[in-house]
Each structure stands twice: as structure tokens, then as C-alpha cells.
């Protein structure tokens, strides 16, 4: 997969709109991953959950983030 990045901005992951991309440190290794935030109403998340969920675009794994977790918001072209 080839990904082109534009400007990078540090923000809270909860402030990013669904369908947008961001970069964050991965939990399982010392690498960074590119994530796509998913809609909380997708049916994958419990109702009234205050966490944010995103898909790692390289591995396809679903990951949970706390609302105020700082990430690097990017405009990605895949």
C-alpha cells in the first residue's frame, strides 16, 4: 500500500471525525501505525462507550483509544 501524507497536526483522537486518518504509536511494537477512525454507530461498539475506535490500515486490527489520547491527524491519500 502506498500512502501520501499532507500536513500533520497533533490533536485528541476524540476530536477527529469518523472516516478520517491519523498516526499513533502501536501497542504491540515500537512502530507507528496509520489508523482510520470508525463511526461509533457502526454496530461494532457498545452504546454509551466513551472510547474511540479505529482500524489500523496496515494490519486491519480494530483498536480502542481513550477520547483524549494525542495522535497526529493526517490527510492521507491511499
Image: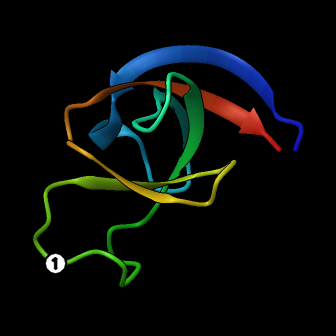
Residue lying at 73% horizontally and 20% vertically, measured from the top left: 6
Categorize mark 1 by other alpha carbons within 10 Å: few (<14), some (14-19), many (20+).
few
Name of the residue lying farthest toward the bottom: 43
27 vs 57, nearest the viewer: 27
Question: Can you say which quadrant of the picture contains the N terminus?
Answer: top right
Is 54 rendered above or below residue 71? below
Name the secondary structure under disc 1: loop
Residue 72 in the figure: left or right of residue 46:
right
Name of the residue lying farthest toward the front: 29
Residue lying at 34% horizontally and 37% vertically, measured from the top left: 13
Looking at the image, what colour scheme do you see? rainbow
Q: Position of residue 34 (x, y in %)?
A: 61, 37
41 vs 1, nearest the viewer: 1
Quadrant assignment, res 78 = top right
Is 8 rendered above or below residue 35? above
Residue lying at 43% horizontally and 48% vertically, measured from the top left: 17
Q: Position of residue 20 (x, y in %)?
A: 55, 46
Q: Which residue is mark 1?
A: 47
Residue lying at 53% horizontally and 34% vertically, measured from the top left: 22
Is 3 rendered above or below residue 51? above
Residue 58 in the figure: left or right of residue 17:
right
Q: Position of residue 16 (x, y in %)?
A: 40, 40
Q: Position of residue 14 (x, y in %)?
A: 28, 42
Is 9 rendered above or below residue 14? above
Q: Report how many numbered discs are placed on residues in the image.
A: 1
Quadrant assignment, res 44 = bottom left
Quadrant assignment, res 49 = bottom left
Name of the residue lying farthest toward the right: 2
Amino acid at each position: 500500500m502506498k500512502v501520501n501524507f499532507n500536513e500533520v497536526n497533533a490533536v485528541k483522537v476524540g476530536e477527529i471525525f469518523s472516516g478520517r486518518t491519523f498516526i499513533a504509536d502501536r501497542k504491540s511494537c515500537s512502530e507507528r501505525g496509520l489508523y482510520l477512525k470508525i463511526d461509533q454507530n457502526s454496530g461494532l461498539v457498545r452504546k454509551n462507550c466513551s472510547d474511540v475506535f479505529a482500524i489500523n490500515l496496515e494490519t486491519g486490527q480494530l483498536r480502542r483509544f481513550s477520547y483524549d489520547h494525542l495522535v497526529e491527524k493526517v490527510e492521507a491519500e491511499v
